Image: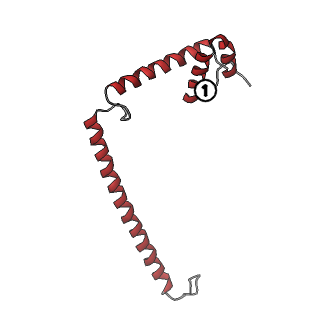
C-alpha cells in the first residue's frame, strides 16, 4: 500500500539509485519510479553523495584516512587506551570466572555433605 511517501532507503540503496541515475540519465523517470522516488529525493541523494565524497577526499589528503578523522598522535593515544581497557576487561573476566567457579564448588559442597531433614532436603 503506497501512501505517497518514498520508502526509507538504506545508504547502500541510495548509492545504487545515484549510480543508476548517473549511468542512465535518459531513463531518469524509470529509475525514480523503480525506487518510488521524486526528483527532489534524487537531488538530495546526489548532494549527500557529493558532500561525502568531498569530505572523504579531504580526510585522505590530510592523512586521516581510516582513522575516523582524528590526528595521528590522537589516534595512537586512543589505540593505547583501547588496548589498556581490553586488558583490564580480560583480567576482570578471568576474576569473575574464577569467582563463579569457587561459588559453585562451595555451594555443591554445602548440600552434598548435609543430611536430609525429611522436609524436602536432598540425601
Residue at horizontal 60%, vertical 17%? 23
Query: Which of the 4 image quadrants contains residue 9?
Result: top right
Name the outermost residue toward the right. 1
The residue that disc 1 covers is 8
Residue at horizontal 39%, vertical 61%? 93
Q: How is the image coloured?
A: secondary structure
Query: Which of the 4 image quadrants contains residue 54?
Result: top left
- Please say if 118 is above or below 102: below
Left or right of 104, for residue 16? right
- Please say if 98 is above or below 78: below
Residue at horizontal 61%, vertical 26%? 8
- Residue 99 is situated, as x and y percent measured from the top left of the image, at 39, 69
Badge 1, how many Cα within 10 Å: few under 14, some, many 20+? few
Query: Which of the 4 image quadrants contains residue 98?
Result: bottom left
- Please say if 18 is above or below 83: above
Name the outermost residue toward the bottom. 115
Left or right of 103, for residue 2? right
- Residue 103 is situated, as x and y percent measured from the top left of the image, at 42, 73
Name the outermost residue toward the front. 23
Check disc 1 and report its element: helix, strand or loop.
Answer: loop
- Which of these two is toward me, 96 or 12? 12
Left or right of 100, for residue 31? right
Q: Quadrant of the C terminus?
A: bottom right
Q: How many marks?
A: 1
- Residue 104 is situated, as x and y percent measured from the top left of the image, at 46, 74
Amino acid at each position: 500500500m503506497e501512501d505517497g511517501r518514498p520508502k526509507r532507503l538504506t545508504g547502500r540503496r541510495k548509492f545504487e539509485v545515484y549510480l543508476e541515475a548517473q549511468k542512465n540519465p535518459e531513463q531518469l523517470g524509470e529509475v525514480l519510479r523503480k525506487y518510488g522516488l521524486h526528483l527532489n529525493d534524487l537531488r538530495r541523494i546526489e548532494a549527500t553523495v557529493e558532500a561525502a565524497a568531498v569530505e572523504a577526499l579531504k580526510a585522505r589528503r590530510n592523512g586521516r584516512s581510516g582513522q575516523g578523522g582524528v590526528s595521528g598522535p590522537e589516534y595512537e593515544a586512543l589505540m593505547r587506551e583501547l588496548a589498556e581497557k581490553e586488558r583490564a576487561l580480560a583480567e576482570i573476566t578471568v576474576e569473575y570466572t574464577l569467582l563463579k567457579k569457587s561459588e559453585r564448588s562451595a555451594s555443591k559442597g554445602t548440600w552434598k555433605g548435609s543430611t536430609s531433614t525429611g522436609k524436602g532436603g536432598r540425601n
